[in-house]
Image (spheres, grey):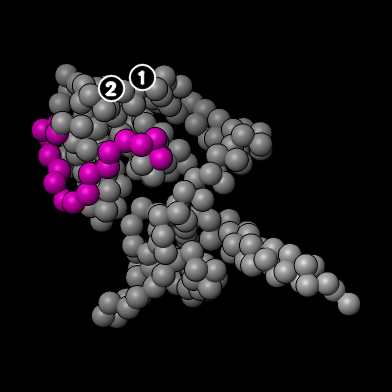
Amino acid sequence: MKSPNRNFKDSIYEQFSRIGKAVSSPKRLELLDLICQSAKTVEALARETGLSVANASQHLQVLRTARLVEANKEGLFVHYRLADQAVCDFFRVMRELAESRLAEVEMITRRFLAGREGMEPVDRKKLIERVRDGSVVVLDVRPFEEFREGHIPGAISVQLRDLEQRLSELPRDQEIVAYCRGPYCVLSIQAVEMLRSRGFNAVRLEEGVQDWRFLGLPVAIGEKSGLRQEEI
């Protein structure tokens, strides 16, 4: 017969394991990463992750049962949002742990970026400083609803799908720094490739808004966006 002490320990660790089980799926991790950017409908999340709506709903229910996300219905659509900012902090720490312990993460990333124009390593610290002091044009290429939820102050919102049509709005005599959702988001990679192929001086900022927050840097909220750099 188990002692009260053993029952207590077993019960506590069983609850902890609920979080582990919820994030044990690659697709659920990707869903969580997307929801960290902004609240999204099931349909939008399914489209972003390459899942059917039914499969996306099942994964989201697992995350909801573990109380990592919340859901509310608005009209015909169910929107999922973070239960707490601590969920994104947890995701970021887990990502960094994987980066530091699993050599495969770097290997897969290096292989993907090999030969891509403008993906050479940059001094990230110096680049962040230049973004902060407004000496470069900062381009946020995420969907606009994500920009509205939080962005680097002074950033210009140009969704990747609209970038080619808006090239004439961008200065050619200034360096452009594109960013999206973080180091494994491909939107900024595609943006930099397009800009450089059109003759712009463009580089990629690996950090996303959640990384920016984690570094203790200010994040702007709202719809204000323009070619004029706002003071950070």
Give the image quarter of residue 194. top left
Q: Which residue is mark 2?
A: 130
Q: Which residue is mark 1?
A: 126
The local secondary structure at tag 1 comes to helix
What x and y, as percent, mark residue 136? 23, 24
Magenta segment: does it hold 190? no
Asked whether residue 190 appears in the rendered view, the answer is no
What x and y, as percent, mark residue 59? 53, 68
Is the Cβ of the residue at disc 2 closer than 8 Å to that at disc 1?
yes
Q: Looking at the image, which residue sits at the far front?
A: 4
Give the image quarter of residue 204. top left
**For the residue marked with disc 2, what is the amino acid?**
Arg
Compared across the picture, whether 66 is left or right of 205 comes to right
Q: Tell me the quadrant of the picture where the C terminus can be found.
A: top left
What is the number of the mark on residue 176? Answer: none
Residue drawn 61% across and 34% down? 100
The magenta segment is 214-230
